[in-house]
Image: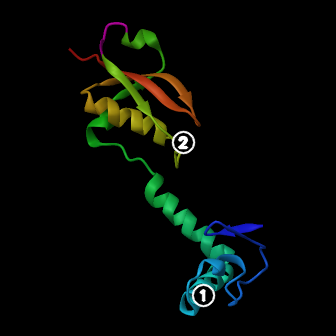
Amino acid sequence: MQEIVGVPMAPDDAPALDGRSGALALARSEGEMEVLQGTWHIIRTMSRDFRTSLAAIVLMVTGCVSVAPQAEKIRVTSNGADVAQCKVLGVVESHPPYMFPSDGVNQLRNNAAALDADTLLLTSSGALRGKTGMAYRCAK
């Protein structure tokens, strides 16, 4: 059973113009009932391929994380010995969702660049909970 505007409705039932079934129970006039019926028809007839394509386009436009120019120079390591003689600048985090596997590290690099870091130590990694790291300044 589906819900439209908070009113339960069977999946194969088209709203009737009697004002008592489905979403049309919320309509106050016959004109509003016709608008609701037209909207319901559009939703039901929209092809699955179109809905899938639309969802993919939205994800591609919003999901990709690019690397800022100054972040491209940041060295990324997971070895604590590599930063033993460096100055700690702060903790950096990335937050899912990630469109590509590299998006989490790209977010960390961008955040480290904002702290004027030249090295990033990865401290934890998780696809669902995000990634964390420490930003360092190692160059003298």
Q: Position of residue 4 (x, y in %)?
A: 65, 71
**In which quadrant of the rendered view does residue 56 lie?**
bottom right
**In which quadrant of the rendered view does residue 75 lie?**
top left
Residue sitting at x 41%, y 26%? 76
Residue sitting at x 64%, y 66%? 6
Q: Is residue 111 left or right of residue 21?
A: left
- The range drawn in magenta is 84-88
Callout 2: SS: loop
Q: Position of residue 58 (x, y in %)?
A: 50, 63
Q: Which residue is mark 2?
A: 101
Give the total number of marks visible in the rendering.
2
Q: Position of residue 62 (x, y in %)?
A: 44, 56
| Residue in front for this viewpoint, 8 or 42 | 8
Tell me which numbered mark, 2 or 1, is placed earlier along the sequence.
1
Q: How far separated are the C-alphas under marks 2 and 1?
A: 47 Å
Q: Amino acid at mark 1?
A: Met
Rendered view: 97 above or below 37: above
**In which quadrant of the rendered view does residue 26 lie?**
bottom right
Q: Which residue is mark 1?
A: 33
Q: Residues within 10 Å of mark 2 (few under 14, many from 20)?
A: few
